[in-house]
């Protein structure tokens, strides 16, 4: 059984970003408007820099679709760059702290940070968002909802209360920070403005919650196939992400077992009811033994402050002495954008695991496989 395979190509100031997604079943009604909508969300948020005013990301389908439906062949997508000047930009004479510049130059044995930073740039995540926005439409066909939002910025935590899905969506859409707590907005804006005035940057934490997942996605057999390792790797591959946790996460190391694990109940449990079984709580964040439990999957990721500081940091010139790092156009914070990237890389991994469990050449075959499994699983 195989799931999804994907790759991206392109540089920050090159002609375009290109992505290929293999494994989508035929017959999926793929909305390009939905993909473009995710790209717009990625470009938004208070504290973004000048690049977002230049680019207006939309995706172009090169292959894999006909008459609005997937063909089952590889889906090839392209996002054209407007700020195309890779051949005109100079070579920095010193590596920037916090970036891939120095380690990349040492890797290739050449003092050319431009050859490193063009691909290491977070600009590449636009294509990961596009591919994830396509993949998540498979999950949505089976009632799965993926929702990301920012819960902390610059050390200031939002007060997140329980509200229904529509209210969540409305709150996030009206927020400049993809936040569910309007009262945090003023404090967060003030923090961003203060950091900007100081020539500095801010990090934060975002959360991704996935509902409607069936139990058993992933595996306990292969450590590399566990959903904890797959989702953790996918999110940690986003530039500037320094930590990932599920459910009570790091706090579980400070608690006793009885305060961490989720009791299993007969039918009608508060979390993750499936067939005769449910759970009294969801401290595990919807994952046990490397597999989904059917409860909401809850993941949080910590993003460090962006490495490009207007005020600069100490560095050393190639073949020279100490200097201040150069400043290139950047954001003060990009945590809201990172939450969008997080949603969509999570979608890529979950859709892949879903198609591994419920395989089929067409969407109808996938649905038949899913329904056959469901009939057997609910009879336990």
Image (spheres, rainbow, N blue to C red):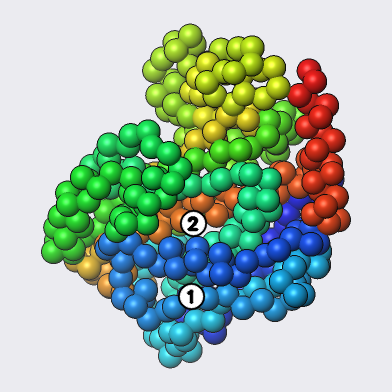
User: For the N terminus, which image quadrant?
Assistant: top right
Q: Which residue occupies 33% across, 45% down?
A: 180
From mark 2 to mark 1, how far is it between C-alphas? 14 Å
Which of these two is toward me, 43 or 175?
175
Looking at the rendered image, the quarter that the C terminus falls into is top right
The residue that appears at 76% across and 66% down in the rendered structure is 70
- Depth check: give the residue in front, 47 or 277: 277
Q: Report the residue that reaches farthest toward the bottom.
A: 88
Q: Is residue 154 visible?
A: no
Closer to us: 190 or 134: 134
Q: Is residue 3 visible?
A: yes
Of pointers 2 and 1, the one earlier in the residue sequence: 1
Residue indicated by mark 2:
341
Q: Against 279, is 133 above or below?
A: below
Residue 57 has which mark? Answer: 1
| Place of residue 172 in the rendered image (x, y in percent of width and height, measured from the top left) | 37, 52
């Amino acid at each position: 059984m195989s799931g999804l395979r994907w790759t991206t190509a392109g540089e920050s100031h090159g002609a375009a970003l290109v992505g290929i997604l293999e494994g989508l079943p035929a017959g999926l009604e793929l909305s390009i408007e939905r993909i473009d909508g995710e790209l717009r969300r990625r470009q938004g948020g208070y504290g973004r820099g000048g690049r977002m005013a230049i680019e207006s990301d939309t995706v172009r389908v090169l292959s894999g679709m006909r008459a609005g439906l997937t063909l089952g062949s590889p889906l090839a997508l392209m996002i054209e760059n407007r700020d195309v000047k890779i051949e005109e930009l100079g070579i920095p004479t010193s590596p920037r702290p916090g970036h891939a510049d120095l380690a990349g130059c040492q890797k290739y044995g050449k003092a050319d940070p431009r050859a490193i930073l063009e691909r290491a740039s977070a600009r590449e995540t636009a294509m990961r968002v596009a591919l994830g926005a396509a993949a998540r439409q498979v999950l949505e066909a089976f009632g799965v909802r993926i929702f990301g939002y920012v819960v902390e910025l610059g050390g200031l935590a939002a007060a997140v209360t329980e509200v229904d899905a529509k209210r969540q969506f409305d709150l996030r859409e009206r927020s400049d920070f993809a936040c569910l707590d309007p009262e945090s907005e003023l404090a967060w804006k003030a923090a961003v403005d203060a950091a900007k005035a100081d020539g500095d940057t801010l990090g934060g934490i975002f959360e991704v919650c996935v509902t409607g997942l069936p139990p058993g996605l992933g595996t306990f057999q292969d450590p590399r196939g566990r959903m904890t390792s797959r989702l953790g790797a996918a999110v940690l591959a986003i530039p500037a992400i320094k930590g990932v946790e599920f459910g009570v996460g790091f706090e579980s190391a400070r608690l006793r077992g009885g305060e961490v694990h989720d009791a299993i109940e007969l039918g009608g449990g508060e979390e993750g009811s499936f067939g005769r079984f449910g759970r009294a709580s969801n401290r595990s964040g919807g994952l046990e033994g490397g597999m989904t439990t059917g409860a909401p999957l809850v993941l949080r990721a910590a993003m460090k402050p962006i490495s490009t500081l207007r005020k600069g940091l100490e560095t050393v010139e190639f073949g020279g002495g100490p200097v201040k790092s150069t400043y290139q156009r950047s954001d003060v914070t990009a945590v809201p954008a990172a939450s969008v990237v997080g949603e969509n890389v999570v979608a890529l991994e979950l859709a892949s695991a879903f198609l591994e469990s419920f395989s089929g050449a067409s969407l109808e075959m996938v649905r038949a496989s899913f329904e056959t499994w469901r009939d057997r699983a609910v009879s336990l």
